[in-house]
Image (cartoon, helix red, strand yellow):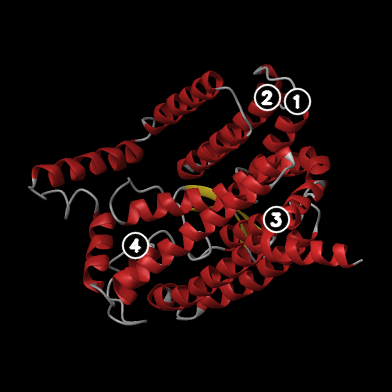
Amino acid sequence: MKRVSNIKRRSFLKVDIEYYFLFILTLILSIIGLIMISSSSVSIGERYFNDPYWFIRRQIIWWAISFIFFILASRINYCYYQKLSNFIIIILIVLLTLVLIPGFGIEVNGYRRWIDLWFFSVQPSEFAKIALVILFSTSLDRKYKDNKHIKNIVFPSFFILCVVTILIFLEPDLGSVVVIGLIMFIVLFVGGLKFKHLFSLGFIGLAATVSYLFLEDYRRERLFNFIERISDIIKGTGESVGTANFQISQSLIALGSGNLTGLGLGNSVQKYSYLPESHTDFIFAIIGEELGLVGTILIVVLFILFMFFGIRVCIKTKDYFGRVMAAGLTSIIVVPAIINISVVIGMAPVTGLTLPFISFGGSSLLTSMISVGILLNISRHNTSPERIQNDLDN
């Protein structure tokens, strides 16, 4: 009995530490998000709804809903998702199809990405990340793990991936497609896909994305503006900084205005109609303006820590399915964060992606919380008797 108690104590102190760090990091990031949305959305709420607190009230409601799902996901054994993978994908495809049907989908500025559910709206492309991670993890575990032939993963998983990405392309939402592609690449890499197969599939995905990028003028303009701005910076002229890409220019002004410690919480100038999407895509710039370099470094460090502990969960998980899914779930948080921050600081073209946990958006927050909840469950179940015995022996 004493030995069993000792095993449990050693397991609690050493193996499950990632669980608590990920839990705390999620709470910190989401609470920072509520604070910054409260500050950055005052102007736009007053302008469009005559209510400066319109956005923060809705985000608090979404936070409460997301937290409930977060706790539930952390309690449900992650192995159950294998049995539900096909059902989840069918629901996802139905939702993505409804987005494109007038009367169900909401069109905003020419984009049809949300479903109207009367009291609130949801963005199915956000949930596609979790659904596809579960699908590919299941497919790799059942078909590829013991029989490493490319056909075992291409059909039907890549067929479904193509259907999902085409539906998201039609919204249109190139940013989400790019994120999904990167997440799937990481899932396949961790799943042990042969390098030649990984390279071939990556090349096909890249070619398809670039081709789609040149179908619309505004997409080409974003890319060329970014290339022009980088070219001018390298040449030292700086001519395109103020003209070629307005959002990036205003974002850099906001970041520069903050200096080391910022103008103070709530004192942003750029949020008053100067910086578009200051409460969503470019909220990181408002953090830099109000909290300075200290605030932006804090956010970056928090995401780095999240990535570190997510990778630790992945490495520690003995179960192949759990390990692959842990990598995918960690990527759902880390990949959009890297892209969003890169856009805000001018290192990538504008994509329209939000910053996980922090930007305004119920679907994004719910997806992030559920992803971490499942990741916590994997962390909780990653202890094997062999590892505990090794700990005791050492």
Residue 379: numbered disc: 3
Q: Position of residue 35 (x, y in %)?
A: 47, 77
Secondary structure at numbered mark 1: helix
Q: Earlier in the sequence, mark 3 or mark 1?
A: 1
Q: Earlier in the sequence, mark 1 or mark 2?
A: 1
To which residue does mark 1 refer?
143
To which residue does mark 4 refer?
276
Of the residues shown, which amino acid type is indicated by label 3?
Ser
Quick check: marks 1 and 2 in contact, CB under 8 Å? yes
Q: Is residue 163 above or below residue 357?
A: above
What is the quadrant of residue 184 in the picture? top right
292, 123: nearer the viewer:
292
For the residue carrying disc 2, how many other residues have a C-alpha within 10 Å: few (<14), some (14-19), or many (20+)?
Answer: many
Q: Is residue 362 above or below residue 209?
A: below
Q: Position of residue 259 (x, y in %)?
A: 23, 72
To which residue does mark 2 refer?
153
Q: Quadrant of the C terminus?
A: bottom right
Q: Nearer the viewer, mark 4 or mark 2?
A: 2
The residue positioned 81% from the left and 43% from the top of the image is 84
Q: Earlier in the sequence, mark 1 or mark 4?
A: 1
Of the residues shown, which amino acid type is indicated by label 1?
Lys
20, 2: nearer the viewer:
2
Secondary structure at numbered mark 3: helix
The residue positioned 62% from the left and 29% from the top of the image is 192
User: In this view of the protein, can residue 201 be seen by the observer?
Assistant: yes
Q: Earlier in the sequence, mark 3 or mark 2?
A: 2
Of the residues shown, which amino acid type is indicated by label 4?
Pro
Instruction: Give the Cα distance between marks 3 and 2.
Output: 26 Å
